[in-house]
Image (tube, helix red, strand yellow):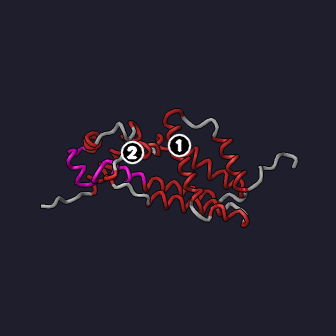
């Protein structure tokens, strides 16, 4: 007989997993820990999620989509293209990797230990790359927009995001982040920031 899935059990699993991932990290959180936190048996976790990675994705996907949607709204309120581009990179590389007790680092931990059979999908990454490419395009003058016509640059930005997320979890925010952001903005705009008196 098929088991009936209950929303309150699903919610308890998500809540328990989120709390543990934020507190202990993905690699130090077991399915048994999640089950205990949710008040269910470990075997019951697999009724709802095929793996711990699938459970993490059920949390991470809406979390990241929410962060990028929030960022897009914030950028819409910034008129100066340089300031808007700079804010994009501040959020992507400095702020989001540290938010919610470094929740982004959980995905790095998960993917570094995932097997081929665990069903990793690039759908979220592709969506995020397209979204960030659009945000960058809106900051660039028309003659520079070709730099983000494909999601190649956004792919590199998310590789950097992964590195900043890992660094934030290990050592806190990068001390070089401001210089990295300024250099990236200058490269994209094709000119250095104006200095006072220019």
Q: Is residue 49 left or right of residue 153?
A: left
Q: Residue furthest right?
A: 197
Please tell me whether residue 43 belongs to the stretch shown in magenta. Answer: yes
Q: Secondary structure at mark 1?
A: helix
As measured in the structure, the alpha-carbon distance from the residue carrying label 2 to the one carrying label 1 is 14 Å
Give the residue displayed 19% in from the left and 60% down from the top: 4
What x and y, as percent, mark residue 158? 54, 51
10 Å crowding of disc 1: few (<14), some (14-19), many (20+): some
Query: Which SS does the magenta portion mostly show?
Result: helix
Note whether 49 is above or below 163 in the view shown. below
Label 2 vs 1, first from the N-terminus: 2
10 Å crowding of disc 2: few (<14), some (14-19), many (20+): some
- Are dots 2 and 1 in contact, CB under 8 Å? no
Which range of residues does the magenta coloring cover? 39-60
Residue under pointer 2? 110
Q: Secondary structure at mark 2?
A: helix
Give the residue displayed 77% in from the left and 53% down from the top: 191
Q: Residue furthest top?
A: 171
Q: Nearer the viewer, residue 197 or 176?
A: 176
Q: Residue furthest bottom?
A: 142
Q: Nearer the viewer, residue 67 or 187?
A: 187
What x and y, as percent, mark residue 117? 31, 53
Give the residue displayed 51% in from the left and 53% down from the top: 67
Residue 121's tag is none
Please tell me whether residue 81 belongs to the stretch shown in magenta. Answer: no
What x and y, as percent, mark residue 19? 37, 42
Which quadrant of the rendered structure holds the N terminus? bottom left
Q: Residue furthest left?
A: 1
Give the residue displayed 82% in from the left and 46% down from the top: 195
Q: Quadrant of residue 74?
A: bottom right
Q: Is residue 10 left or right of residue 111?
A: left
Residue under pointer 1? 163
């Amino acid at each position: 007989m098929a088991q009936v899935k209950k929303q309150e059990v699903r919610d308890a699993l998500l809540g328990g997993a989120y709390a543990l991932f934020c507190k202990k990290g993905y690699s130090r959180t077991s399915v048994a820990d999640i089950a205990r936190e949710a008040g269910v048996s470990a075997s019951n976790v697999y009724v709802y999620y095929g793996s711990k990675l699938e459970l993490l994705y059920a949390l991470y996907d809406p979390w990241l989509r929410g962060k990028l949607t929030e960022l897009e709204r914030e950028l819409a309120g910034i008129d100066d293209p340089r300031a808007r581009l700079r804010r994009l990179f501040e959020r992507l590389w400095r702020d989001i990797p540290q938010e919610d007790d470094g929740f982004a680092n959980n995905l790095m931990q998960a993917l570094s230990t995932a097997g081929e059979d665990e069903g990793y999908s690039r759908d979220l990454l592709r969506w995020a790359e397209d979204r960030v490419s659009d945000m960058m395009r809106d900051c660039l003058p028309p003659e520079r927009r070709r730099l983000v016509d494909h999601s190649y640059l956004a792919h590199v930005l998310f590789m950097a995001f992964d590195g900043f997320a890992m660094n934030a979890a290990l050592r806190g925010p990068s001390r070089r982040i401001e210089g990295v952001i300024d250099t990236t903005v200058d490269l994209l705009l094709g000119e250095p920031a104006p200095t006072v008196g220019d």
